[in-house]
Amino acid sequence: MEPAAFIAALLALGGAVAAVSLRNLIHCALCLVLTFFSVAGLFLGLGAEFVSFAQVMVYVGAIAILIVFASLMTRDPGADPARVPEPRAIQPWPLGLGIAGAVTGVLLACVGSSRLLPDVTAPAVAPSVRELGQELMTRYVVALEVVGLLLTAAMIGAVVLAVREPRPLDREVGR
Amino acid sequence: MTPLQRYLVVSTLLFGVGLAGALTRRNAILVLVGIELMLTAANLNFIAFWRYGPNPESAAGIVFTLFAIAVAAAETAVGLALIIKIYRHRRTTHLDQMDTLKG
């Protein structure tokens, strides 16, 4: 791993830790942008330019902005003391941290001890964007159409869910 | 440690951070952020295995990642729309307060 990729990995991990631990939702979304940019840099270092650009456009340009908008539209007044349930015998957050730590530890042990990983260091010849487009239009065309259908359905579903239905009073005034 | 293993370690740590966030945070939007981090870690795994795998000249790894990104975008859009809808209804995004099935 060259130094640039190392820095990108450090930034990605630091941004991820900040994104899930900060109190302010807007700060979390901005740290998420840092993580997504760094992962796009890692993709560039691995020779996947097109995925890197897609990562920047979809994650940074769409998902992070969507999260900022959603956090602005849902100003949480904080936990309502009357509605928060009684403190439990087992606190949830050490349990969650423990589970996440255990999963990470098992995965790290597997990565460290596996003998099945391919050991290829020869310079790769990555497919160009032109070849990628031809592959998408020939071999993967059915999958491409299905993804297009999925995105359309998700967009319509999101609009239908989030649209504000008019209150009865507004309807009568409109009439 | 081979280069592939270094990238796998990075993506494992990213996945662990995302999992910890999704399990411990009580705000629905931050749970979604944790899920996004886990999906990003999976994408990093795809690209690392494609680059250091036996067939780096094939487009399958890249195409798989592109489709995963598209599905993640759809998932986030619907998830955030659901959170906004629940917020309008219950005036909260706190997960401990979303404890009834009846609206």
Image (tube, rainbow, N blue to C red):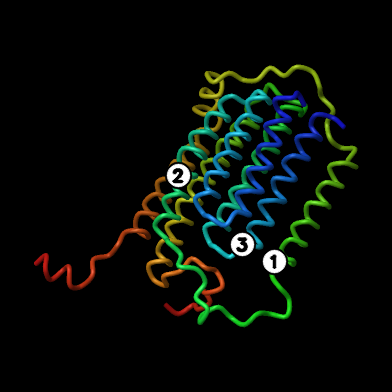
The answer to whether the residues at label 2 and label 1 have Cβ atoms under 8 Å apart is no
Chain bearing tag 1 is A
Can you tell which mark lies on residue B25? Answer: 3
| Picture layout, residue A158 above or below residue B67 | below
Q: In which quarter of the image is the N terminus of chain A?
A: top right
Q: For this view, does A4 lie left or right of residue B68?
A: right
Q: What is the distance, in whole Å, between disc 3 and disc 1 at their CAs?
A: 8 Å
Q: How crowded is mark 2: few (under 14 residues within 10 Å), some or many (20 or more)?
A: some
Chain of the residue that carries numbered disc 3 in the rendered image: B
Amino acid type at circle 3 is: Arg
Q: Are the numbered discs 3 and 1 placed on the same chain, yes or no?
A: no
Which of the 4 image quarters holds residue A85?
bottom right
Residue A156 coordinates in the image, percent (x, y): 36, 52
- What residue is pinned by disc 2? A65
- State which quarter of the image contains the C terminus of chain A: bottom left
Q: Which residue is outermost to the left?
A: A175
